[in-house]
Amino acid sequence: MAIIISIANQKGGVGKTTISLNLAYALAKKGYDTLIIDTDPQFNLTFALIGMDIIKRNDNNIGTLLIENAVKKTQIENAIIPIEENLSLIPSHLKVSAIERLLMTAYMREQRLKRVLEKIEDEYDFIIIDNPPSLGIFLINSLGASDYVLIPTELGYFSVMGVQLTLDVIREIKSTELNPDLEIMGIVANKFTRQSKVPQVRLDQLKETYPDLPVVAILPRAVAVEKSQGEGKPVFEFDPKNKVSKAFLQLAEKVIKNVR
Ligand SMILES: Nc1ncnc2c1ncn2[C@@H]1O[C@H](COP(=O)(O)OP(=O)(O)O)[C@@H](O)[C@H]1O
Ligand SMILES: [Mg+2]
């Protein structure tokens, strides 16, 4: 059975998509069969990985899988796009935001992703779920289907509130039948820099505010990250010597260690 990990924070721009992509590539590179799922109606991850091919995926994407009442295994398999050795994608699509609205009133709407993954999780070691920057039905589906959640955050002035809101949602999900076993793996502090004192101060505050919440990784801010995304590549392939590349590979090691 696959280990399912959600990368979640309602705040946008904190690095959910970046971390999903790099973590999934790193796990695949280490030989783990990895599936990456884009549940964001804004489809940044899908676009980074398959570019304009996204247009063709009208009938097979995360939206069509979630809106279908009794989704069949063949439908799921048809939606999966091979990216490279050990790495596949269930894409998002331009039409997913319309589907999200339909899902809002659907029967058993919180458990759709869980039902989808039950049918295929035997075929993977890891399933990484990238999430939208909002608290909606897709995030609830992701958290409902996951074993673990990683919370990326920046270290700016308002960042701590994003962490708190995410923790609130997780607590709510854990208190229901949907997923009482959901575990918080910890925080990924992203875009760290020593050019100003603020990130270190915020990091210390974060640790003080949430003493039980591990900081799983500190990822430096680096231009190479954005550049690598333009090419749909993980940063450790684009610029292997960059210290951010090392940090992403260490994050993957840590994740593997934490789930064993
Ligand atoms: N460590 C980093 N260093 C530099 N830029 C980063 C880093 N992490 C993310 N970014 C950039 O920040 C922006 C937002 O990241 P993204 O992963 O799209 O966030 P989210 O998915 O949470 O909205 C992107 O342009 C991305 O390239
Ligand atoms: Mg994103």
Image (tube, grey):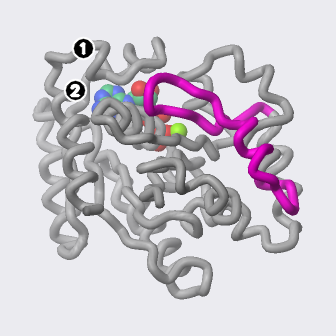
Q: Residue at x 18, y 36 (%)?
A: 247
Displayed quadrant of residue 214: bottom left
Q: Position of residue 207 (x, y in %)?
A: 17, 65
* Mark 2 within 8 Å of ligand 1, using the beta carbon: no
Looking at the image, residue 46 sits to the left or right of residue 168; the answer is right
Residue, disc 2: 245
Q: Residue at x 64, y 39 (%)?
A: 90
Above or below — where is 92 with respect to 155?
above
Nearer to me, 194 or 176: 176
Looking at the image, residue 47 sits to the left or right of residue 128; the answer is right
Q: Residue at x 78, y 44 (%)?
A: 74
Q: Residue at x 44, y 66 (%)?
A: 147
Residue, disc 1: 239
Q: Position of residue 246 (x, y in %)?
A: 16, 30
Quick one: SS at disc 1? loop
CB contact under 8 Å: marks 2 and 1 = yes
Above or below — where is 139 with respect to 224?
below
Nearer to me, 184 or 166: 184
Nearer to me, 138 or 195: 138
Displayed quadrant of residue 240: top left
| Nearest to N terminus: mark 2 or mark 1 | 1
**Number of marks in picture:** 2
Q: Position of residue 20 (x, y in %)?
A: 43, 40
* Crowd class of label 2 (few under 14; some 14 to 19; many from 20; radius 10 Å): many
* Mark 1 within 8 Å of ligand 1, using the beta carbon: no
The answer to if 82 sits in the magenta stretch is yes
Which residue type does callout 2 highlight?
Ser
The answer to whether residue 13 is seen in the rendering is no
Above or below — where is 130 with respect to 105?
above
Range covered by the magenta-colored residues: 66-94
* Crowd class of label 1 (few under 14; some 14 to 19; many from 20; radius 10 Å): some
Which residue type does callout 1 highlight?
Asp
